Image: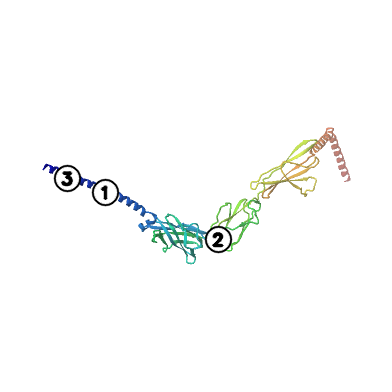
Amino acid sequence: MNLFRKKHHFKIRTNGIISINYSIVIIFSLVFFSFFTNVSFVWAQDVFTSPVFTNSLNNQSNVQMYISPRNGNFVTGSILEVGVYIDTKKNSINTVDLKVNFDPKKLAVANPSGGKSIFDIWVEPPTYDNTKGLITMSGIIPEGIVTTSGLIAKMSFKVLSAGSSTITINNATNVYLNDGAGTKANVSFGRAELEFTNQIPDGVVIHSDTHPFEDNWYNNNNPIFSWDDKKDSNGYATLLDSNPKTVPTNEITTNKNNMSYTDIGDGTWYMHVKSKEDQSWGNTSNYKINIDTTPPKKFTPTINTITGDGRDEYVLMFGTTDDLSGIDHYEVGILKNNRDKNTLPVFIQTESPYVLPVDNKENIKIIVKAFDVAGNVTEGSTSLYPNNKNWYIAGLFFLILILLVSHYVFGHHVGRNIKRAYIFFKNISKKDENNQF
């Protein structure tokens, strides 16, 4: 009995041990299986998230196509370059069938495709129809591509007319996933909203016969301006003022291609002209004139005498200023006093100081002309008497002689005796007259 119990107890304990061991094995197996199952799941997940297969799992993700620039303002006559881009949103794509619409009244295709593209092969090269306003093209990428800003094509348009316009990607455009099944992707399309304004016409070319050079000074204050007449011009807005950047108001002041002014003031002036063509005003053209009608300031030349080597030299000094155009040059003329007063001297251009070419016996008059840059003239004059010392001596001698004679006559009563004789003879004459009666 005891032996049986011992054996039974051993069996039970053995069965218990076996049961416990089985439990451990089962638990270990489950953990091991779970571990490898997770590893396999992770591996499978990595495989199915590769570019080739993502599309089949995420077929509902939109692919986006957009146009750049999306907005802007452009002038008529200019060339507008537009790019069509794609954001695959982490999907791999391999084919795009693109259709783009534009307004043929506002735009005309100059080049349907330019620059680089994500396409390796063009199934349908870019073509366009400027009558229908349509551009079409198809291309493939054999290995597929995942991109956020892939350039499909760049298109060049010429802006034809002013106004608002759009460039759109047609809803018939298709994008195919690189999933081996040719699945169409769900695509959202962008558009460009653009503004076109008339191109500003070029400014006219202004010239002046009275003031032909803009940097020169003139003493003519009656300027005349003219400009090339434009065939399409409706008229011109003009203005003359002292501001170099003035833009005339949008009001036609003349239909002619010339304008004249009289008695305008001294200084720098600007002629402004702009042309109106259709409904557009052109750029403003500017023309500068410089006017100076005021002569240089008055002045009086002076003469300095330099004595040496037994003769005198005479140095002429002169100078003045001009407030506007400035002094250009001086001219000196010498006139001998014994010549006819109507004789004009010969003037030579020179500078101060100037040594006068005269000898010690000539009396001369010197005239100095000061010219400003505009051609206005101011004259200054002086006289020179090289032999005036002899005249001083002769005059002094004559004065002394008169004084001596006067002293002799009046000091020796000669004058009184002459007066008495005069009275005597006068009385005699009266007596003779009375006797006759």
Residue 105 visible in the current orientation: no
Counting residues from the N terminus, which is met first, the one under dot 3 or under dot 1? Answer: 3
Q: Report the side of 136 relative to 240 (left or right).
A: left
Q: Is residue 385 above or below residue 173?
A: above
Local SS, label 3: helix
Q: Which residue is mark 2?
A: 276
Residues at marks 1 and 2, CA–CA distance in whole angstroms: 94 Å
Which residue is pictured at 14% across the width and 42% down the height? 6
Residue in front for this viewpoint, 158 or 35: 35
Q: Nearer the viewer, mark 1 or mark 2?
A: 1
Residue 33 picture location, percent across and down: 28, 50
Local SS, label 2: strand
Q: Which residue is mark 3?
A: 11
Task: Residue type at mark 2: give it.
Answer: Lys
Q: Are marks 1 and 2 in contact (CB under 8 Å)?
A: no
Q: Is residue 12 above or below residue 306?
A: below
Q: Report the side of 10 relative to 430 (left or right).
A: left
Category of crowding for the residue at label 1, using alpha-carbon neighbours closer than 10 angstroms: few (below 14), some (14–19), many (at least 20): few
Counting residues from the N terminus, which is met first, the one under dot 3 or under dot 2? Answer: 3
Q: Which residue is mark 1?
A: 29
Counting residues from the N terminus, which is met first, the one under dot 1 or under dot 2? Answer: 1
Residue 256 picture location, percent across and down: 60, 61
Task: Residue type at mark 1: give it.
Answer: Ser
